[in-house]
Amino acid sequence: MAFGVKREELTKWKRDVLSGEIAFLTHFWYDSRFPQYKTVTKAGCADIKKLINWGKKYGFKEEWIHNRDGYPHFDLLGENQLEILQKEGITDQIIRFKLEERLIEVLKGK
């Protein structure tokens, strides 16, 4: 279940993905498989080869790509999420979702 994202943000992410850019969308999220995480970032790109090569930089495997509704993406969680957003310069999403603070809480076992 996703929440905390504005319609304009989702529309822009979809447009950027379809145009062949590597695009990032962070939102609040809950999945019972990962109860320790409260956010996810979708790193998407409709150019599958470009997305695969991007993912290889971070040790991701091609089979980890989710290709739902024509918006292929990797899901970024936890330490990977924060590290990748930092390296990609996506500081606005780090700040907005307080990712550094949330990761510290997870690592402390809260």
Image: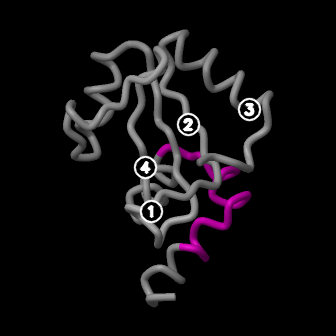
Query: Nearer the observer, disc 4 or disc 1?
Result: 1
Mark 3 vs 4, N-terminal side: 3
Mark 2 vs 4, N-terminal side: 2
Q: Which mark is residue 32?
A: 1
Asked if the residue at tag 4 contacts the one at tag 3, i.e. Cβ–Cβ closer than 8 Å, the answer is no
Q: Is mark 1 on a helix, strand or loop?
A: loop
Q: Mark 4 points at which residue?
A: 76
Q: Residue 24 carries which label?
A: 2
Q: What element carries label 3?
A: helix
On the image, the x and y values in percent for residue 45 come to 45, 21
Amino acid at the residue labelled 4: Leu
Side of 5 where 80 appears, left or right: left
Q: Residue furthest front?
A: 32
Q: Nearer the viewer, residue 86 or 51?
A: 51
Total residue callouts: 4
Q: Name the residue under label 3.
A: 9
Mark 3 vs 1, N-terminal side: 3
On the image, the x and y values in percent for residue 62 come to 21, 31
Amino acid at the residue labelled 2: Phe
